[in-house]
Image: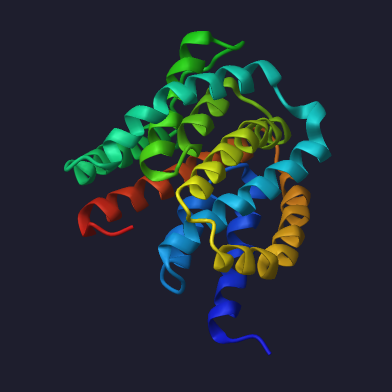
Amino acid sequence: MIDATTLLVLLIVLFATLVRSAFGFGEGLVAVPLLALWIPLKVAAPLVVLLSITIAAIVVLQDWKMIHLRSTGWLFFSTLLGIPLGLLLLTSSHQRVVKAALGMILIAFSAYSLAGRAPLELKQDHRGWLFICGFFAGVLGGAYGMNGPPLAIYGAMRRWSAQHFRATLQGYFLPASIIGMGGYWLAGLWVPAVTHYYLVTLPVALLAVFLGRAINRRLHGEAFLMFVYVGLVGLGALLLAQAITGRL
């Protein structure tokens, strides 16, 4: 019989994985704060990264032809350069100010786009923007474990289709998550409880990956971008809430 804590963990993983599979990003900021209410943060964070590896691997195998390999390579390379600064921010005494600023930037960019304005559009890959977005993905990943928003902004500027958006971000997240999990392992945070919850939640995560793929294939053009912008507004609001409360 499943206990209440395990049931809640399963529901959180199901919802977060569905979000990630349908839109390509966002499950970390959904899952980690909610899971941390029921299981220790030192278990929740590695669990989410381990699930991220699984999700990304499945999507890459399913839709590898949809991945923009050149974009993925540049984003990943510049992310590696941004991680050290993110780690410095992690130990900074100004985390709340940084989170508030990031939250307001995400909300402003997305609200501007949702208001019907014409956001910057890139007709082809731009190395400068690839570097900027990848670098800040590394900074945010190193500091807060949230690589997704800068990558989503780049994908929105490039007007990637929902399918290319989802697949390309997973092509990025797969090596990034493997490196992140390696860091948890070296830090001694890959404990038996992480493996236990991973095995327990794996069936619902797999179900959510395939359901999310079906949803993703029904999203097209401006409607998909609207969902991306709304998601970024939500993430920005969550960052602001974290900055105000001083909690996860």
One can see residue 228 in this view: yes
Image side of residue 152 versus residue 71, left or right: left
Q: In percent of the image, x 21 and y 55: which residue is there?
A: 244
Q: How is the image coloured?
A: rainbow
Residue 233 coordinates in the image, percent (x, y): 41, 45
Residue farthest to the left, as pictured: 93
Is residue 217 something one can see in this rendering? no
x 76%, y 61%: residue: 207
Q: In which image quadrant can residue 196 be found?
A: bottom right
Residue projecting furthest to the bottom: 1
**Taking 184 as reference, is 31 above or below it?**
below
Residue 4 at x, y = what percent?
Answer: 55, 85
Query: Is residue 204 shown above or below 177?
Result: below
Q: Position of residue 53 (x, y in %)?
A: 65, 46
Q: Residue at x 56, y 71 (%)?
A: 9
Q: Position of residue 184 (x, y in %)?
A: 49, 48
Residue 181 found in image quarter: top right
Would residue 26 appear left or right of 103 to someone viewing this image? Answer: right
**Residue 226 image-quadrant placement:** top right
Quadrant including the C terminus? bottom left
The residue at 56%/58% (across/down) is: 47
How many numbered callouts? 0
The quadrant of the image that shows the N terminus is: bottom right
Q: Would you place residue 54 above or below residue 94 in this image?
A: below
Q: Nearer the viewer, residue 107 or 201?
A: 201
Say which of 160 and 27 sits in front: 27
